[in-house]
Image: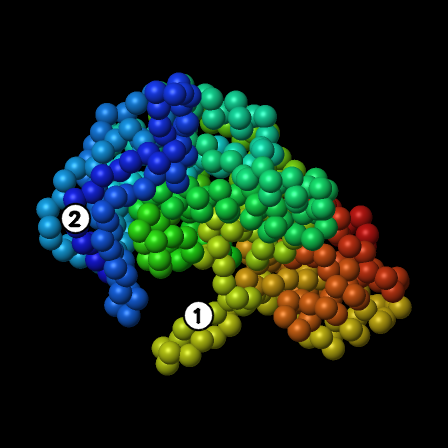
Amino acid sequence: MAFAVTSSPAAISGSSFSRSSASSDLKIPQIGSFRLADRHATVNLSQKRCAVKPVNAEPKRNDSMLSHAATTSAPEVSEKVEVEDFEQLAKELNNASPLEIMDKALEKFGNDIAIAFSGAEDVALVEYAKLTGRPFRVFSLDTGRLNPETYRFFDEVEKHYGIRIEYMFPDAVEVQALVRSKGLFSFYEDGHQECCRVRKVRPLRRALKGLRAWITGQRKDQSPGTRSEVPVVQVDPVFEGLDGGDGSLLKWNPVANVDGKDIWNFLRAMNVPVNSLHAQGFVSIGCEPCTRPVLPGQHEREGRWWWEDAKAKECGLHKGNLKEDGAAEVNGNGATTEIDIFNSQSLVTLSRTGIENLAKLESRKESWIVVLYAPWCPFCQAMEASYVELAEKLAGSGVKVAKFRADGEQKEYSKNELQLGSFPTILFFPKHSAKPIKYASEKRDVDSLMAFVNALR
């Protein structure tokens, strides 16, 4: 993806910040409240280019609540065209350290880039930005439904780094309409997308319209189903930036290639303040009603929107990560082949006919434990090692261990006949009982699964 940069003299003005002789009231702007004057940019979609004008200014930081957008002017830029291929830059930086990537991002975009801070372990981004020695901006989405611990953490981060976080809030009228029509907890019944759209996505869209790049804490290991291919820098596939149009916004992911445990090693080594919820078992932290601690054997994202399928576990901020059902890889002939999971000689793969016959039997020669799964589901992937180990331990014990792929065409049948709620669902078919027993716990480590089997066989 090439980024085409055209330049003309520019000035940033705070459209919502003013002081008149008739009034002494200050209007404090948000990220998306300023405009770039005299900007001339064109987007050539056929060449996948984006017209932007990097501002390499390094203004002094200011501890006031005023956005830099309202207080800083952009420098004069000479009349020339500069083209940068950000796909190539992503390849060059793929093995770079997060600090090097952060430094490059801040160097290129100055005051027109900001860190998106959620109040979780992405505080590492703020620490990396501080270590570059460059000025930086931080914004956060206050949905109105965050944990009290998260609000206290925001205050601690501001004091620790001497910064002011630029908070974005949802539109009060939209929130009021949603709550009055559907109640406070409608997302438990019809999905979280509508609430997230009002409380998170639209405020983020406003914020990004005032920027030309943003920095996120996405990591490939956070969600194998949706984030496994996140590059360190990319043209944002969903949101628009200051210049408007497709390709007008850059998205930097400095910790894309870093493991979660290494993030925590870094935070401890640098004595960085962290959200107290982490000590209570929370890993991925969002709004209070939609976040809970994870249990042994669970993937970190399983603590979010736990009542929904794994493929839905993006709130819309990183919607470009979502793909269609199914996991595939390209073979040497250029054709795609399906990737399956739970592959072991100790495991039985059940077809639709096989699971139907098993369910119909009133008396079985052996007990069975069966996982209903989807190969693209990151939570199924997270328990793969435990389930394969369980199969190996139970080999020759009188309990058969099996898997049944329950997505796609089999999903409706699995919901109606096999108690499928979300992936993965684990069923135990006793030896002398027709009705299968659903594993209710979310502890999917091998010891917990073995205890479940031993209690029933």
CA distance separating discs 2 and 1: 45 Å
Q: Residue at x 21, y 58 (%)?
A: 4
Q: Earlier in the sequence, mark 2 or mark 1?
A: 2
The answer to whether 109 appears left or right of 328 in the picture is left
Secondary structure type for disc 2: loop
Q: Which mark is residue 14?
A: none
Task: Name the residue carrying label 2.
Answer: 8
Q: Position of residue 423 (x, y in %)?
A: 65, 57
- Identified by mark 1, the residue type is Glu
Callout 1 crowding tier (Cα within 10 Å): few <14, some 14–19, many ≥20:
few
Furthest residue in direction front, as rendered: 22
The answer to whether 291 appears left or right of 210 in the picture is right
Q: Is residue 345 visible?
A: yes
* Labels 2, 1: front one: 2
Q: Is residue 269 visible?
A: no
Q: Position of residue 185 (x, y in %)?
A: 70, 42
The front one of 381 and 67 is 67
| 35, above or below 128, in the image | below
| 428, above or below 31, in the image | below
- Identified by mark 2, the residue type is Ser
Q: Residue at x 49, y 59 (%)?
A: 322
Q: Position of residue 388 (x, y in %)?
A: 60, 58
Q: Residue at x 75, y 51 (%)?
A: 439
Task: Name the residue carrying label 1.
Answer: 329
The answer to whether 129 appears left or right of 172 in the picture is left
The front one of 64 and 120 is 64
Q: Residue at x 29, y 28 (%)?
A: 71
